[in-house]
Amino acid sequence: MTTTAELIMVNLDSSDPVAHAAFYHRVLGWEITHSQAEYSMISSSGVSVGFGLVEGYRPPRWPDANSDKRYHLDLYVDDLAIAEKEFVAMGASKPAFQPGGERWVVLIDPVGQPFCICRRPAS
């Protein structure tokens, strides 16, 4: 294969793009580069995450395998317990079902999408 691609952006469905972008701005420390009711965006190092308004948006029901799931982010953190506490204080919630044991924690962002925080490898 001679052609390679470079990821420049991921766009996510949202019920509240401004709040969704603000949440991940705080979680990731990325800059809010666009903020409107219909569409908001955060960016860092040439990569962006956009949040687009979808009327009638319904979040997935974690861990219901029959529920629609639009995306799933995995994020490295240095300390799972500290990150969990901080992200919940920012508006995330922690569901009862936790399949990761000690390796990762599933959280639900403010618009209902699951994401995982994973312990950063020691190397």
Image (tube, helix red, strand yellow):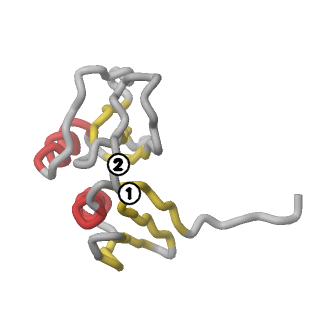
Q: Which labelled disc corresponds to residue 78?
A: none
Q: What is the total number of numbered labels drawn onto the structure image?
A: 2
Q: Determine whether 67 is above or below 120 in the image.
A: above
Query: Residue 37, how many percent across, how many down?
Result: 27, 71
Splitting the image into 4 quarters, where does residue 7 fall?
A: bottom right
Give whichever of 123, 114 is nearer the camera. 114
Q: Amino acid at mark 2?
A: Tyr
Most extreme residue toward the front is 56
Q: Residue at x 50, y 61 (%)?
A: 10
Q: Is residue 85 left or right of residue 49?
A: left
Q: Residue at x 41, y 72 (%)?
A: 43
Q: Is residue 39 left or right of residue 108?
A: right
Q: CA distance from mark 2 to mark 1?
A: 5 Å
- Residue behind mark 1: 54
Q: Which labelled disc corresponds to residue 57?
A: 2
Most extreme residue toward the bottom is 33
